Amino acid sequence: AQSVTQPDIHITVSEGASLELRCNYSYGATPYLFWYVQSPGQGLQLLLKYFSGDTLVQGIKGFEAEFKRSQSSFNLRKPSVHWSDAAEYFCAVLPITYAGGTSYGKLTFGQGTILTVHP
Amino acid sequence: DTEVTQTPKHLVMGMTNKKSLKCEQHMGHRAMYWYKQKAKKPPELMFVYSYEKLSINESVPSRFSPECPNSSLLNLHLHALQPEDSALYLCASSQPREGSNEKLFFGSGTQLSVL
C-alpha cells in the first residue's frame, strides 16, 4: 500500500524568507502526486499536481514542487513566503491505475505540515 | 462555476438525532466523495460515488449512510452518531477518466460536533 511521510509537523519562517516543505512517498511505482493547502476549518485547495513529464511543477500562489524519483520525494517550495501562506499543507498520492480502471480519487494524505509565518 | 458547496457549515447534534449533510456541484463531475478529517489529522476517504453508484465504501459504520440522488448532489445521512464521530466532513468531486484521474475539487466542509 502507498504511504506518504511529511517529516516536519510544524515549520516557522519569516515573511519574505524561502520555504521548502518535505514529502516522501512509498509506492511500487510512480504515483500521481499532489500538494494541497488547508486554512483552519476550511476545505482543501489544490496547489499543484504531478502526473508525468517535467519534474519541476509550477502551481498557484507562486508555489512549485520538484519530483525526484531517486529520492521518492516531492518537496514543495516557494522563494518568498507571504503572511497569507500560513496554513496547513498536505502532500498526497494517488495510485496510477492501469487496465482501464480509475482510482477514483482515493488519495492518501501525509500527516500535514503546519506553516507559521512571522512578520 | 468551479465550486463544491457544502451545507451546513457547522452542525451540533445529539447522539439520538438524525441529520443530513449536503453537497452540491455543477461542474458536470461524475465522481463524488466523502472524506472525514479529525482534528490535527489528514483527511480519510469514506465513500466514493461514480456515476451515481456507490463505488467505494471504506468500511464505514452503518450510522453513516450516503446517498447520491443525482449527478450534482451528494448527501450523508447521520443517525445515532458517537462523540468520536465529531470531525470536519469534506465533500469532493472529480471527473473520472479511464486510466487516469483528474484533480479533486473540495468543498469547505461541515464541522460536525456530536454531544
Image (tube, grey):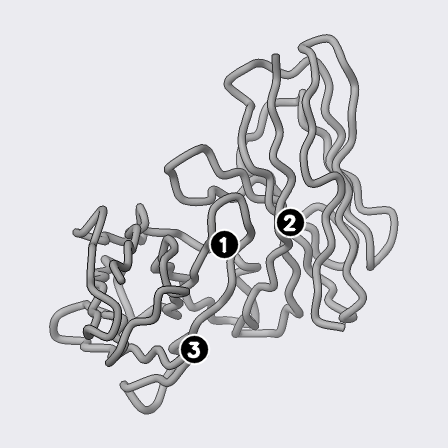
Tell me the quadrant of the picture where the C terminus of chain B can be found.
Answer: top right
Marks 1 and 2, Cα distance to the nearest angstrom? 13 Å
Q: Is residue B29 above or below residue A59?
A: above
Disc 3 with disc 1 on a shared chain: yes
Q: Where is mark 3, residue-wise?
A: A61
Give x and y (percent) for residue B82. Answer: 58, 14
Q: Is residue B21 above or below residue B13?
A: below
Disc 3 with disc 2 on a shared chain: no
Identify the chain of the residue marked 1, using the numbered disc in the image.
Answer: A
Residue with the most extreme top position: B16
The label shown at residue B91 is: 2
Q: Quadrant of residue A74?
A: bottom left
Name the amino acid, label 3. Answer: Lys
Tell me the quadrant of the picture where the N terminus of chain B can be found.
Answer: bottom right
Q: Residue at x 46, y 44 (%)?
A: B43
Mark 1 burial class by Cα count in 10 Å: few <14, some 14-19, many 20+: many
Name the amino acid, label 1. Answer: Lys
Give x and y (percent) for residue A79. Answer: 24, 80
